[in-house]
Amino acid sequence: MTAAVEVEAPQIIDGLSAEDYHADCTSISSSGLRALLNPGCPAQFKYDRDHPQAPKREFDMGNAVHAEVLGEGHAIVEITEFTDYKKADARALRDEAYAAGKVPLLPKEKAQVDAMAKAVREHPLAGPLFAPGSGIAERSIYWNDSATGVRCRVRPDWLKQLPGTTLCVDLKTIKDAAPDTISRAIRDHNYHQQDPLYIDGIEAAGLAPDGCRFIFAFVSKIPPYLITVRELTDQDRDIGRARNERALRIYAECESTGNWPDWTGAVTEIPQIGMPTWDTLRQAEEFLK
């Protein structure tokens, strides 16, 4: 693959397509850094980067809600002639939309997206954050990490300038927007790495002279499409930044050596493995008395 953009740091690009942004192999994104660390590994990251997957239907809802709320992103194609994809003609229309870089939605899905976007606009916190004309959507930012020299990139959903600060607002769809569910999603998807990387990139590009705050806005996929707006705790942000630093060192080493190891790496002995620590402690207490 070739670079999608010219890489002279720092660089701010408006209007770059999502496809070109994600196709850039000369820099690494937040999702890439997360993929390098356990439970991922460099070998899997390298393969996935070199063999991009076709669009997944599981991402259609999120992409469509982004487009409706932000006014930027994938164009939406409503397939009004069918209510499902059981027929070949329906699947052909769906695949035609994917091939054109658009998001196909069945009528019931389009109604759901409209309702979710309406819920965001009417929410007392999320609504003002995403007010039309108050921010810039999908701006691509490139810079070099000072410690490793690695070229990094971020693409904030919504950048909003306020007196004394810059807000980076990230819109996520989730099955259930309850705070406990969101906490688990932060752990499971390592969103605490996304937060500091975006802040670092925005500040490195000179877009936040007074500092940047990263805001999560989670919207539920189930009626009545409840919304939770939160900022990450300082401690979790520090952990996320430390994870990013380790992932950047791993990436820099892999790029310089051409060696992309799996989970085991170079060993001469077969390593041991056990249950997760909590389960080992629990079962040891019960059985090894």
Image (cartoon, rainbow, N blue to C red):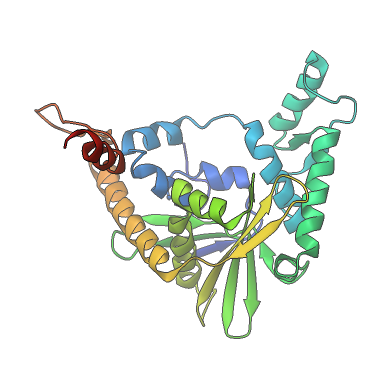
Residue 71 seen from this side: no
Is residue 127 rendered to the left or right of residue 52? Answer: right
The quadrant where residue 149 appears: bottom left
Q: Position of residue 132 (x, y in %)?
A: 78, 66
Residue at (22, 33) in percent of width and height: 287
Q: Residue at x 35, y 61 (%)?
A: 239
Question: Residue lying farthest top?
Answer: 88
In the image, taking residue 37 as reference, residue 183 lies left or right, namely right
Left/right placement of residue 281 relative to residue 11 reads left
For the question of whether residue 40 can be seen, the reply is: yes
Most foreground residue, 277 or 118 = 277
Which residue, as the protein is rendered here, is positioned at the far left? 268
Number of on-image labels = 0
Q: Residue at x 62, y 32 (%)?
A: 56
Establish if 6 lies above or below 259.
below
Q: Is residue 121 above or below residue 249?
A: below
Residue 284, position as x, y percentages in the image: 21, 37
Of 190 and 289, nearer the camera is 289
The x and y percentages for residue 129 are 70, 69
